[in-house]
Image: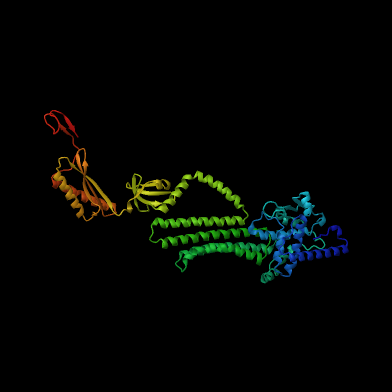
Amino acid sequence: MIVISRTARGGRSVLFVMIAIMAWASGATSEERAMHPLKPPDRSSPRATLTTFLDSIDTAWTLYTAKDPSVRDVFARARGCLDLSDVPPLVGPEVSAQSALVLKEVLDRIELPPMADIPDAAEVATLGLKRWTIPHTEITLVQKAGDDRPGEWLFSKEAVARATEFYEKVRSLPYRPGRLGGHIEALRSGTDATLIGRLVSSLPPSVRKEVNGMLVWQWVALGLLVLVSALAAAAAGWLGRRWSASRMPGARFGVYLFPLMLIATPFFGRVMILRLFKIPGEPVLWVRLVFSMMGYFGLAWLAAVILARIGGFIADHGFRDARPLKKQLVRVMFRIASIVAVTVIAVMALQRLGVPVAGLIAGVGVGGLAIALAAQSTLENFIGGIILYADQPVKVGDFCKFGERRGVVEDVGLRSVKIRTLDRTIVTVPNADFAKLQLENLAERDRVLLRENLRLRYGTTRAQLEAVKVELESMLKEHERIADEPLRVRFIGFGEYYLEVELYAYAMTDAWPEFLEIREDVLLKVMNIVERSGTRLALPTEIHYQGGQPVPGERSGSDIHAT
């Protein structure tokens, strides 16, 4: 678009000529766009960007007043002329719309150089320009580099950030001839809602005055909106707790009331701010950011609660007859899933806030590596706990042998295992160390081995030995608490001072106290059998053979010592 300079304001005929040229240029542009609807807006130079920006807003206002739905696409071309790299994506559309309208107001009030003096694509290539500032201003256009829209010329992010500041300095100036402005004053005045519009019109003029970019009644409406939202969230939390603690129908759903209210807050706020009241200004953007963070917080809370409920339901119903460790493992896995879900939602929120998540993740990765090296033992214990949960060599309540000690498992945590020993003390073993031990789960046996070595004195005859063996085997077979198979009684060798007989059988019990009773009964019966046979149990003895007492197979007079 050709812009009229202040030196041309005096000639009315020149004005008419310029207006005719503008109308022809606008029509030519529309005709070209109709022939090539997919052609992107021209932002190849400062001249092209300024032309696209000014024409797009003028066309958008015409479409807006005619209530043409294509106004969004046309206005998007103007918003695309702004560098929004420092604007959080969460409020990007609102910031770009407001900044575009304000910059249009500024450009239509200040003196611009003739369009021929603004660099075009050929001059940019020849001179190697990367920045261009509108003369006598601080409004700069820059050429984008990198992968994000390379080569396009946009209003710099500094110009976008200071758009309102520029507008306040020039708003007292009149529009240049033929210029329409950004219509910021018309759009600032309020609402499209008929009832609210009538109410605002009936208010005193003092309430409709502007204060720091917003009308007084808009400040009041924004304050009431924040207050109502806070009270609604607090009420939802209170009602949710009361509902959950009551015995009313659906009480288990009370825990969802508060996070659902938080999730609804940004949607409610957006409708009230942008559609019902149409409140502009930077304070509104901060309110929307706070509402959006409340929504993401509520979404994370809801995801964690739902996953915890699902994990509990699966553990209680899908693993009803499973071991306690399996149920605990299900709950732990769903807790991990909750952490992952909350982390994903947090990353989404940071992205919407404009935080460089890629750099943050890279930094967290490096920091995580350092933490992992520093907390290597902790991670090792955590992995050991997962192995214990998955493999389940022991479970809570099992009597086991770990290393050289024995005890009852009282707790299997993510860091350590707690065992109550036979001395009634609690031993805490790190998971990594416990998983490496040779574990013997004594609670899993269906029988208890009864194995005793009977030592008879050397004076026992063969007949006595045979009799003892027969009676011992008969006693074990007739015992109601001893299994028939496997069962054996064998003479297994000569000791230093005894003849050794092995008793090998299984007590039909898995309880250690009961096994002790069975073993005691068997041993008492063994004593009776030995006494009836005419022999005795061996005691450590030392026998001396002296001279004059010949020993079979030895010469007389020799001294022999046998132990």
Q: Quadrant of residue 562?
A: top left
Q: Is residue 71 above or below residue 458?
A: below
Q: Across the whole image, how many numbered discs are drawn on residues? A: 0
Q: Is residue 328 above or below residue 63?
A: above
Find the residue positioned furthest to the left: 548
Query: Left or right: 75 with respect to 517?
Result: right
The reply to whether residue 75 is visible in this rendering is: yes
Query: Where is residue 104 shown, x and y percent of the image?
Result: 75, 60
Query: Where is residue 359 shown, x and y percent of the image?
Result: 60, 50
Query: Where is residue 220 shown, x and y percent of the image?
Result: 65, 63
Q: Is residue 457 above or below residue 266?
A: above
Query: Where is residue 313 shown, x and y percent of the image?
Result: 44, 62
Query: Left or right: 400 with respect to 137?
Result: left
Front in this rendered view, residue 53 or 466? 466
Query: Left or right: 22 with respect to 488?
Result: right
Q: In which quarter of the image is residue 332?
A: bottom left
Quadrant including the C terminus: top left
Front in this rendered view, residue 201 or 413? 413
Front in this rendered view, residue 132 or 418? 132
Quadrant including the N terminus: bottom right
At a point 43% along the width and 50% down the height, the residue shown is: 385
Q: In which quarter of the image is residue 7?
A: bottom right
